[in-house]
Image (cartoon, rainbow, N blue to C red):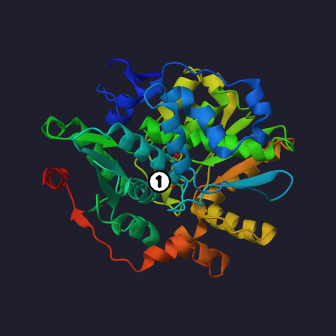
């Protein structure tokens, strides 16, 4: 598969180059040149296929011929070593739990897949690659864990000081080895700006091969298609109009769902569920896209003021606003509404959601009011214990820590504080 830059001012490139570069030389996001729908039989028989087989069929065309089939199968097997259960809460609402991986956020799959692709491409390469990534919370942990000990790859993670949860901070600052954590005096957007600036800085890029592990990287973005396939596999016999409500920040996950739809997956509709960072909600109302500085919320992994994948969504729907509106609805909720939803889910279903999942749940509720004939699946993108303070406080119950979390709580944080781009550059050139 060839990829083109959405800025249209860079040459087309292979999967391998798109993964290594992250962003095209003209700073555009890469997008596959062609999408070949999967066969009808695939969707009819999906119930009989293993998750690995489904994933292989889903992603094969996007990776070939750069990774041979046997190697791709091994990468998939290794990236998907946990469950993706759908829990039906009632006849119209389910949740797809994406938090059973090592860092208990959905980003584990994309991070593991990308790490293994880079590791594969780097097998016979003596030059080291530096993965530079900004995190609003969960990306850092998933990337740190996914890339730990991958040969020839160093990882530098920037996170906003005091703006990620304790557990999230532990997950990205305690691994050591090839993982370096930088604690930035600022907000997530400052971290992201520094990362963007580094990619444009020739003094750096002449000296080192920099790549990103944010969802702008195709190897992190595309494996997220799997989730929608796995949900369909579990639900298609019972429900025929399936709607997904996706708690969205950079819009990578939802955009992967739309790619799965392009492959032929019968998805009735998408709901982008947002916290107070409501650029897309406003866009769908006004047809005017106005990025804003992000505001801090209790669903911090979605505190994004200018979602980087939105441009891919526009490409998928050919920049046609009316087609986009037919497929996508977006709602925005306050922290107060999110807290009430957490309580509501607990009281009504005896289910403990995390703040991101709760925003997704609210999206289902709003959508179902006018589309009661559909079945809405909200994505549970993180385990509730990752947001312990908020969740315990709201539902007034103590949570049991899963083993993945217990294991890191007593480890020592190691992070370097930085407050400017110059600091970042000094760290990178060390
Ligand atoms: C990253 C993240 C999101 C947002 O996903 P995008 O792909 O950036 O839209 C939502 N919830 C959690 C828990 C996350 O970590």
Q: How many marks?
A: 1
The residue located at (29%, 27%) in the rendering is 25
**Quarter of the picture holding the C terminus:** bottom left
> 132 or 198, which lies in front?
132
Q: Is residue 50 visible?
A: yes
Q: Relative to 345, does residue 16 appear above or below in the rendering?
A: above
Q: Relative to 406, does residue 197 appear above or below in the rendering?
A: above
> 253 or 317, which lies in front?
253
Q: Indicate the position of residue 192 as horizontal and vertical percent values.
A: 33, 48
Q: Relative to 399, does residue 343 appear above or below in the rendering?
A: above
The residue located at (56%, 33%) in the rendering is 59
Q: Indicate the position of residue 200 as horizontal and vertical percent values.
A: 22, 35
Q: Is residue 7 visible?
A: no
The residue located at (50%, 61%) in the rendering is 297
**Residue matched to label 1:** 303
> 428 or 61, which lies in front?
61
Q: Indicate the position of residue 20 as horizontal and vertical percent values.
A: 33, 35
Please give left or right for residue 33 compared with residue 364 in the image: left
Within the image, what quadrant is residue 324 found in? Answer: top right
């Amino acid at each position: 598969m060839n990829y083109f830059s959405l800025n249209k001012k860079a040459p087309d490139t292979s999967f391998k180059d798109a993964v290594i570069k992250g962003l095209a030389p003209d700073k555009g996001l890469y997008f596959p040149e062609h999408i070949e729908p999967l066969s009808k039989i695939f969707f009819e028989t999906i119930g009989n296929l293993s998750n690995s087989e489904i994933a292989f069929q889903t992603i094969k065309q996007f990776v070939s011929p750069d990774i041979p089939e046997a190697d791709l199968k091994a990468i998939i097997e290794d990236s998907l070593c946990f469950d993706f259960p759908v829990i039906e809460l009632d006849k119209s609402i389910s949740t797809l739990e994406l938090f059973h991986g090592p860092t208990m956020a959905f980003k584990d799959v994309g991070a593991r897949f990308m790490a293994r692709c880079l590791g594969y491409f780097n097998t016979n390469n003596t030059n080291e690659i530096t993965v530079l990534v900004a995190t609003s919370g969960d990306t850092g942990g998933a990337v740190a864990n996914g890339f730990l000990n991958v040969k020839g790859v160093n990882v530098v993670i920037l996170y906003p000081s005091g703006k990620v949860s304790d557990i999230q901070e532990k997950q990205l600052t305690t691994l050591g080895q090839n993982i370096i954590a930088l604690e930035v005096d600022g907000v997530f957007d400052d971290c992201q700006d520094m990362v963007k600036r580094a990619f444009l800085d020739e003094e750096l890029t002449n000296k080192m091969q920099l790549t990103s592990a944010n969802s702008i990287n195709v190897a992190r973005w595309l494996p997220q298609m799997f989730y929608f396939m796995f949900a369909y596999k579990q639900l298609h016999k019972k429900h025929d109009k399936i709607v997904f409500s996706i708690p969205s920040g950079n819009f990578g996950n939802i955009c992967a769902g739309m790619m799965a739809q392009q492959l032929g997956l019968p998805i009735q509709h998408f709901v982008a569920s947002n916290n107070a960072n409501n650029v897309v909600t406003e866009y769908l109302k006004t047809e005017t896209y106005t990025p804003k500085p992000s505001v801090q919320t209790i669903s911090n992994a979605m505190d994004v003021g200018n979602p980087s994948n939105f441009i891919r969504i526009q490409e998928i729907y050919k920049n046609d606003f009316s087609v986009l509106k037919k497929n996508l609805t977006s709602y925005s909720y306050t922290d107060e509404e999110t807290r009430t939803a957490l309580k509501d889910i607990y009281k009504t279903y005896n289910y403990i959601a995390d703040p991101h999942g709760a925003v997704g749940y609210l999206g289902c509720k709003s959508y179902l009011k006018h589309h009661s004939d559909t079945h809405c699946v909200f994505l549970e993108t993180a385990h509730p214990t990752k947001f312990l303070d908020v969740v315990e406080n709201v539902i007034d119950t103590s949570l049991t820590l899963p083993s993945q979390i217990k294991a890191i709580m007593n480890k020592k944080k190691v992070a370097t504080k930085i407050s400017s781009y110059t600091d970042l550059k000094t760290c990178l050139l060390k």
